[in-house]
Image (cartoon, helix red, strand yellow):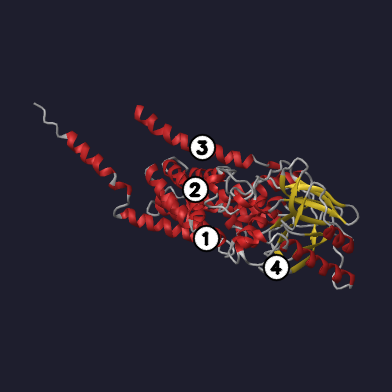
């Protein structure tokens, strides 16, 4: 007679599986480590110039998930993501918290942290493969790419690349764009984790050391090739920051304040030009949402100030077409003929400019009742011929996406501009986080970038990512600068989306290999 001793033992194990969802013993130390690493990654983000914290933070995360189960990797990734994204996106709470509580902030952070959790699960799987640092980096960046696309068009905020606006790795943007910079950060961090794991092993340290050193050396070697010379001459530009009241959501009900403030600031610039205090610019850039136009695109105030200045304006606003479609757009405003060529924003902000699930969205967004219809995105790169300059345009949120300025530069833009309205977000870090994206785009495409913000920060960014002029938050300021016009296309511009798809293939392929390899070993 066989005594069934094994079955009760299995039941006991199954009964205890729920308890293993929470960490025990060393698991608590690992959980604390990834939370500290996530906050460390936030601490290395703009406006702080602590770019070197990003690879160190990623190294801690990679060390914790190395060799773990996919389920454990997911849990640790979720913790890492929350610890990073909650403070990084604190401006959402500043913006919406008073009226909607913490739910919009927590909801966005949770959705984005899910992708980091999936990255952690994938990294745990591929950490067993030869050359693990490469595959772990590819998996993490693949998750970044995914969350930049879905849901509702994605949310690219918080990519590793955007922590590197002052770092040694920034130059790699000129070779492979934001994807290359993110991959370099992750590879350096994963290499550090592997080196720490092999610290007591006399052999086998060469590969992880290469994973650490190659990205850093590549970044240093690439810097001399980041072009800044004025290949097509220079342009004198003026950026008008007319300011806005720091009233958060109250700005929704102050329809004319942005328009009036910026007309007044542009008039002051015209006075200074007429008096000889400021040299006449070739054109003037005004921020997003300064105007509001019907199908005829008429605005006597803009026409008057353009005529006084005697140069074209580049101005953002809301425009309705004859068929009723509403767009967030930027217009070229000629001093003689008025509104001309326009660029329509390609990437709309979900739950603001386009509202999915309106009955539910009403609980977390003030824009549902403010805009009864969704805005319609554009589908063409923005290149405007302004004052003899081919100006590439991306509006606000556009700058976080890879395709907008890639398309504009491929279409011949010699200078880039980012009109934006950040007045919603008070004195938070949001404007500085967005400025870091503009700095990366400058290096990525070898173009100067003009950032025109309603209430700051406005800036003049050189093709090497350096900021030569910058305004303060919630002040009325006008920046006038001479900027280089450039025609050469960087490797990143010419490659377009190829680096993105390469990393996705590496990441997905590595995860697939991690499932296939154990099964092959089991059948051997």
> Percent from the top left, x then y, of residue 410?
75, 44
**How far apart in space, not on screen, are marks 4 and 1 (Cα)?**
27 Å
Residue 97's disc number:
1
Residue 471's disc number:
4
> Percent from the top left, x then y, of residue 79?
42, 53
* SS at circle 1: helix
Q: Residue at x 14, y 34 (%)?
A: 5
**How far apart in space, not on screen, are marks 2 and 1 (Cα)?**
18 Å
Q: Nearer the viewer, mark 1 or mark 3?
A: 1
N-terminal-most mark, 4 or 3: 4
Residue 508's disc number:
3
Q: Which residue is mark 2?
A: 111
Q: Does residue 431 appear in this view?
A: no
Position of 12 with respect to 29 (left or right) is left
**How far apart in space, not on screen, are marks 4 and 3 (Cα)?**
43 Å
**How far apart in space, not on screen, are marks 1 and 3 (Cα)?**
38 Å
* SS at circle 4: loop
Callout 4 crowding tier (Cα within 10 Å): few <14, some 14–19, many ≥20: many
N-terminal-most mark, 2 or 4: 2
Position of 38 with respect to 145 (left or right) is left
Q: Nearer the viewer, mark 4 or mark 3?
A: 4
Q: Are marks 2 and 4 in contact (CB under 8 Å)?
A: no
- Is the N terminus in the top left, top right, bottom left or bottom right quadrant? top left
N-terminal-most mark, 2 or 1: 1
- Asked whether 40 or 90 is in front, the reply is 90
């Amino acid at each position: 007679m066989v005594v069934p001793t094994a079955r009760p033992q299995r039941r006991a194990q199954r009964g205890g599986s729920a308890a293993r969802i929470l960490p025990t013993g060393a698991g608590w130390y690992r959980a604390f480590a990834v939370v500290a690493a996530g906050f460390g990654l936030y601490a290395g983000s703009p406006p702080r110039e602590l770019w070197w914290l990003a690879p160190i933070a990623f190294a801690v995360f990679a060390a914790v998930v190395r060799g773990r189960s996919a389920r454990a990797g997911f849990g640790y990734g979720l913790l890492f993501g929350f610890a990073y994204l909650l403070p990084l996106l604190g401006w959402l709470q500043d913006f919406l918290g008073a009226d909607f509580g913490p739910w919009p902030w927590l909801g966005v952070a949770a959705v984005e942290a899910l992708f980091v959790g999936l990255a952690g699960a994938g990294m745990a799987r591929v950490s067993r493969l030869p050359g693990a640092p490469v595959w772990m980096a590819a998996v993490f960046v693949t998750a970044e790419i995914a969350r930049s696309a879905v849901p509702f068009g994605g949310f690219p905020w918080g990519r590793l690349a955007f922590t590197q606006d002052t770092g040694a790795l920034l130059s790699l943007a000129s070779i492979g764009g934001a994807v290359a910079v993110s991959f370099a950060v992750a590879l350096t961090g994963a290499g550090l984790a592997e080196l720490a794991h092999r610290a007591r092993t006399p052999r086998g340290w060469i590969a992880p050391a290469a994973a650490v050193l190659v990205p850093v050396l590549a970044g240093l070697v690439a810097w001399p090739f980041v072009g800044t010379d004025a290949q097509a001459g220079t342009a004198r530009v003026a950026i008008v920051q007319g300011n806005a009241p720091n009233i958060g959501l109250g700005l929704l009900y102050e329809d004319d304040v942005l328009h009036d403030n910026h007309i007044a600031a542009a008039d002051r610039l015209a006075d200074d030009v007429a008096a000889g205090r400021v040299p006449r610019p070739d054109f003037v850039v005004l921020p997003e949402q300064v105007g509001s136009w019907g199908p005829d695109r008429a605005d006597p105030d803009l026409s008057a100030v353009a005529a006084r200045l005697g140069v074209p304006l580049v101005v953002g606003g809301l425009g309705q077409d004859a068929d009723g479609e509403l767009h967030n757009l930027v217009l070229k405003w000629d001093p003689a003929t008025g509104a001309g060529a326009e660029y329509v924003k390609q990437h709309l902000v979900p739950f603001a400019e386009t509202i999915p699930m309106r009955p539910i969205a009403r609980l977390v967004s003030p824009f549902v009742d403010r805009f009864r219809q969704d805005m319609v995105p554009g589908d063409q790169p923005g290149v405007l011929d302004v004052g003899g300059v081919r100006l590439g345009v991306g509006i606000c949120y556009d700058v976080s996406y890879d395709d907008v300025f890639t398309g504009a530069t491929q279409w011949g833009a010699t200078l880039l501009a980012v009109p934006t309205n950040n007045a919603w977000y008070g004195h938070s870090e949001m404007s500085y986080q967005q400025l870091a994206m503009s700095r990366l785009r400058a290096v990525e495409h070898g173009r100067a970038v003009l950032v025109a913000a309603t209430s700051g920060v406005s800036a003049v960014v050189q093709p090497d990512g350096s900021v030569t002029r910058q305004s303060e938050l919630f002040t009325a300021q006008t920046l006038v600068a001479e900027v280089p016009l450039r025609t050469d296309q960087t490797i990143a511009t010419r490659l377009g989306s190829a680096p993105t798809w390469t990393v996705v293939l590496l990441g997905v392929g590595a995860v697939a290999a991690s499932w296939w390899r154990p099964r092959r070993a089991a059948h051997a």
